[in-house]
Image (tube, grey):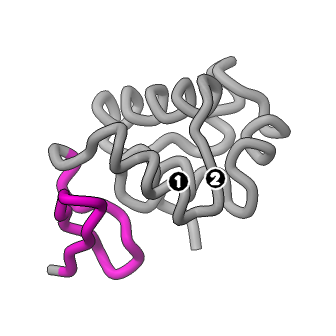
Amino acid sequence: MPQKNYGATTVDVDAEGYLTDFSQWTREIASAVAREEGIAELGPAHWKVVEFMQKEFKENGQAPSIRRLNKSGVITTKELYELFPGGPVKKAAKIAGLKKPEGCV
C-alpha cells in the first residue's frame, strides 16, 4: 500500500492520494493536503465543510454528495466551488481524510 509523508508523519494512501486509514488524519495533515490541492490556508468555512463531511462519513459510511452538502444548509454549491475550486467534493473529501466519494471520476 502506498504511503505519503506529511512532515514527520507517514500515512497510508491509495493510488490517488486519499487516506486509507481515517485514524491517521489530523488537522495538520489536512492543512498539508489542502496546500497540495492549491488551497493556501483552511479558514473557518473550510473547516465547517470538513467537519460536516467527517460527521456524514461516520454516520453513513461515505462522503456526502454535492447535493447533500447543499441541502444540509452548511454551505451553498457556489460557496463550495469558491472554497474548493476544481472538484469541490473530491478535494474536500481528500482534505477531510475520507476515501474518494462514490460517483466522482
Residue 44, quarter of the rendered image:
top right
Q: Which residues are magenta?
A: 2-22
| Label drawn at residue 34 | 1
Which residue is label 2 attached to? Answer: 39
Task: Please give the name of the residue rendered at 74% of the width and 55% of the height, measured from the top-left corner.
Answer: 85
12 magenta-colored: yes
Amino acid type indicated by mark 1: Ala
Q: Are marks 2 and 1 in contact (CB under 8 Å)?
A: yes
Of residue 44 and residue 61, the one placed in the foreground of this image is: 44
35 magenta-colored: no
On screen, residue 11 versus residue 81, left or right, reads left
* Location of residue 26 in the rendering, given as x and y in whole percent from the top left corner: 28, 40
Sequence-first tag of 2 and 1: 1
Pick the quarter of the image with the C terminus.
Answer: bottom right
Pick the quarter of the image with the N terminus.
Answer: bottom left
Amino acid type indicated by mark 2: Ile
On screen, residue 66 versus residue 78, left or right, reads left
Q: Secondary structure at mark 2?
A: loop
Of residue 88 and residue 41, the one placed in the foreground of this image is: 41
Task: Please give the name of the residue rendered at 68% of the width and 39% of the height, measured from the top-left corner.
Answer: 67
On screen, residue 7 versus residue 50, left or right, reads left
Looking at the image, the residue that sits furthest to the right is 78
